[in-house]
Image: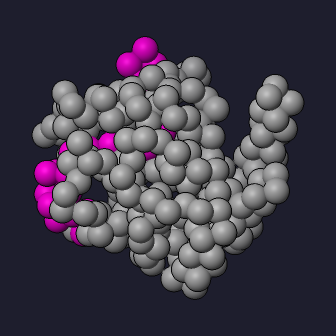
């Protein structure tokens, strides 16, 4: 079964102080390097589509060549919002692919085993996403930040990437994505009509969004190296 991956690295990095995250240093490599390496090495990933900001395409292509990421067949420009970048990636998927995995480059510590479990789940389910159970108490509030209800955290998961889906869903997903204003993850537009399977993940698959996250990632990387 041909499985393609879309790695989204086109964020503006507003919460990082207006610094695009994908090329910030993590250890001796850019953040983008780590997820590309994991998907490159996975035997079930056939092709990688890398989505970056338009003014960073050459820089991304240079990185791909430098590290021999030969599965990265396309480096394309992202859109105004993340959902627009995902749409651009989905429109570039090979017609031969059966599954597609969409991953945030800002999650550099994605593991090979998680990718395998997502792909395996797609044999039974039309979409699969990694998640971890919510630890904190979660409350729903109104626009004035007044608590309206307390959610049952036993049924609440924090969702990560890579999010996988069958390619046959793409046409429908593309049509909905182009019309939607707020899309917070890649399966939100199909989950009311299709079964989306949660795949247990790990807190180590966190997303680098703020300077604090980047410091945490650097600390985590140093511990990984110490254990090897």
Nearest the eye: 20 or 73: 73
Residue shown at 22%/68% (left/top)? 179
Residue shown at 30%/29% (left/top)? 120
Residue 102 % position (x, y)? 39, 51
Residue shown at 71%/61% (left/top)? 30
Q: Is residue 127 magenta?
A: no
| Total tally of numbered discs in the picture | 0
Q: Which residues are magenta?
A: 152-178
Residue shown at 55%/35% (left/top)? 111
Is residue 81 visible from the viewing direction of this image? no
Q: Is residue 224 above or below residue 43?
A: above
Q: Is residue 171 left or right of residue 228?
A: left
Q: Is residue 158 magenta?
A: yes
Is residue 204 visible from the viewing direction of this image? yes
Q: Is residue 166 above or below residue 157?
A: below
Residue 56 % position (x, y)? 59, 79
Residue 161 % position (x, y)? 46, 43
Q: Is residue 171 above or below residue 160?
A: below
Q: Is residue 84 left or right of residue 222?
A: left
């Amino acid at each position: 079964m041909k499985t393609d991956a879309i790695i989204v690295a086109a964020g503006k990095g507003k919460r990082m102080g207006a610094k695009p995250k994908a090329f910030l240093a993590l250890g001796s490599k850019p953040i983008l390097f780590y997820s590309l390496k994991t998907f490159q090495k996975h035997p079930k990933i056939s092709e990688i589509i890398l989505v970056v900001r338009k003014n960073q395409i050459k820089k991304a292509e240079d990185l791909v060549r430098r590290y021999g990421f030969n599965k990265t067949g396309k480096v394309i420009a992202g859109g105004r919002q993340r959902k627009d970048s995902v749409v651009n990636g989905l429109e570039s998927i090979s017609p031969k692919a059966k599954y597609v995995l969409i991953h945030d480059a800002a999650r550099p510590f994605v593991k090979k085993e998680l990718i395998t479990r997502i792909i395996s789940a797609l044999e039974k389910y039309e979409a699969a996403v990694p998640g971890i159970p919510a630890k904190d108490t979660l409350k729903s509030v109104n626009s004035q930040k007044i608590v309206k209800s307390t959610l049952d955290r036993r049924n609440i998961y924090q969702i990560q990437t890579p999010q996988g889906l069958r390619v046959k869903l793409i046409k429908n997903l593309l049509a909905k994505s182009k019309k939607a204003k707020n899309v917070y993850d890649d399966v939100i537009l199909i989950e009311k009509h299709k079964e989306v399977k949660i795949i247990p993940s790990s807190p180590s698959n966190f997303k680098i969004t703020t300077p604090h996250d980047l410091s945490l990632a650097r600390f985590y990387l140093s511990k990984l190296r110490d254990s090897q």
